[in-house]
Image: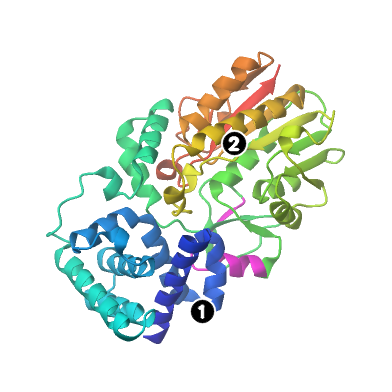
């Protein structure tokens, strides 16, 4: 019982880091597990509890509000997290109702003192007992898709537009939202050799991919140095597509314009041919350090704004523009992102994306290729960016990228490629192949 309580305390710590310090759950997780000395099933319980709350926050807040006379915005944030954790255990986990309620009451009491502790414990007890009594039949059905699947409405609208733009039926929308709320097993990319890794299984599409079935990513990475990197299979596929593309004529120079934190740059650096230089540019020093840790000696890492073309008059055969974006394609792995982004963020991002793509084209030789990638299916960050930039650049055109994804099925009509969580089991990566005329 003590270990399970420790797991719940760790989940509460992780939620606090995400809420108060703006941490990314996937990055803060390892330090939380280490702090509480959790591994195996106890660590898995913490992950399921914290990530379940982050994914279903809007729905759980609705349940809490239906059982409370207080506006949820007036409840102390840490007590709100305790309530959400209790609701998740009652509604979505195989935890007996009494255990979910009692453990939540203990958590509420533990973060308070004196009479305040008793009052908070009583409040949590009353709310969660109400949820336990009513969640199966007593609550009003959530016909609002935004509440039912805990996605802001603007993201739902963006997904619907993206599905239609890709020639898909908007009836797939519900499947996509469901996929975002399913726990995604961690995936790693195996480099250099093919070691036997206990507790893993092969990926669905990429030969380099291993799915972690019963092992914690950070423990595996620490034990194998740089032979593996944590990386979604969708990211592996776009890196492989970059390598499969074929510029005309001999090659001498490759470029990754937005290399941090280094996953794609690492896979590319593994395959740089002899006689070809590979430059990886990253704007932020701390992310550039991460790139240096994972790339091979074939790569030169530069800390600079790629829009300024710090490489001077050098022209490249291949350029990767993995553009900063809203990250709407990775909500199943970064569930807190849905609550941090809003539609107004697109304006600044779109300007940045256009400037990066124009700089890439300016630095690509005739017959060379630019691979434009985003971890978002949003039309304004993908097809609209291509349309705007290519309208200014008659010296470039989009080619069919689907042959660069061999074996991957249901890629749509092309010429661009959009991967989907509910179809391909990957993050929703977008890939476009542009060739200088």
Res 159 quadrant in image: top left
Instruction: Judge the density around disc 1: few (<14), some (14-19), many (≥20) Cα neighbours within 10 Å.
Output: some
- Residue at point 35%, 67% (across, down): 76
- Residue at point 34%, 48% (across, down): 178
How far apart are labels 1 and 2 at the CA level? 38 Å
Q: Report the mark closest to the observer, 1 or 2.
A: 1
Quadrant where the C terminus sits is top right
Is 119 situated left or right of 164 in this image?
A: left
- Residue at point 68%, 29% (across, down): 370
Between disc 1 and disc 2, whose residue precedes? 1
Q: Residue 33: x, y in percent?
A: 52, 73
**Depth check: 284 or 123 in front?**
123
Q: Residue furthest top?
A: 394
Whether residue 99 appears in this view of the structure is no
Asked if 360 appears above or below 143 in the picture, the reply is above
Residue identifier under label 1: 36
């Amino acid at each position: 019982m003590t270990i399970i309580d420790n797991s719940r305390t760790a989940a509460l710590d992780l939620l606090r880091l995400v809420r108060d310090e703006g941490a990314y759950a996937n990055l803060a997780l390892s330090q939380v597990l280490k702090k509480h000395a959790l591994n195996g099933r106890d660590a898995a319980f913490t992950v399921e509890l914290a990530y379940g709350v982050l994914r279903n926050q809007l729905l759980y807040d609705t349940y809490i509000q239906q059982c409370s006379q207080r506006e949820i915005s007036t409840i102390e944030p840490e007590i709100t997290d305790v309530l959400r954790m209790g609701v998740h255990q009652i509604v979505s986990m195989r935890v007996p109702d009494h255990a979910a309620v009692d453990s939540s009451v203990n958590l509420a009491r533990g973060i308070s003192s004196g009479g305040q502790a008793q009052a908070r414990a009583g409040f949590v007890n009353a709310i969660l007992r109400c949820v336990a009594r009513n969640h199966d039949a007593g609550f009003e059905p959530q016909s609002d898709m935004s509440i039912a699947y805990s996605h802001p409405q603007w993201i739902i609208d963006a997904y619907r537009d993206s599905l239609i733009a890709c020639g898909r039926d908007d009836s797939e929308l519900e499947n996509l939202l469901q996929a975002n709320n399913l726990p995604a097993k961690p995936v790693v990319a195996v480099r250099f050799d093919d070691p036997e890794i206990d507790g893993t299984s092969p990926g669905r599409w990429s030969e380099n991919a291993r799915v972690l079935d019963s092992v914690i990513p950070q423990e595996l990475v620490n034990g194998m140095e740089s032979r593996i990197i944590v990386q979604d299979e969708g990211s592996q596929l776009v890196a492989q597509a970059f390598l499969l593309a074929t510029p005309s004529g001999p090659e001498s120079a490759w470029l990754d314009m937005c290399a941090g934190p280094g996953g794609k740059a690492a896979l590319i650096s593994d395959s740089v041919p002899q006689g070809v230089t590979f430059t990886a540019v990253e704007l932020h020093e701390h992310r550039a350090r991460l790139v240096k840790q994972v790339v091979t000696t074939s790569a030169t890492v530069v800390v600079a704004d790629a829009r300024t073309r710090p490489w001077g008059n050098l022209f490249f055969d291949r350029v990767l523009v993995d553009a900063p974006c809203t990250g709407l394609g990775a909500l199943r792995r970064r569930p807190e992102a849905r609550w941090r982004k809003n539609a107004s963020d697109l304006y600044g991002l779109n300007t940045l994306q256009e400037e990066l793509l124009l700089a890439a084209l300016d630095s690509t030789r005739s017959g060379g290729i630019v691979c434009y990638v985003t971890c978002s299916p949003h039309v304004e960050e993908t097809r609209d960016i291509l349309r705007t930039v290519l309208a200014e650049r008659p010296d470039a055109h989009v080619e069919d990228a689907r042959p660069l994804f061999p074996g991957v099925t249901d890629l749509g009509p092309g010429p661009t490629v959009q991967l989907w969580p509910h179809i391909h089991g990957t993050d929703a990566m977008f890939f476009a192949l542009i060739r200088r005329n």
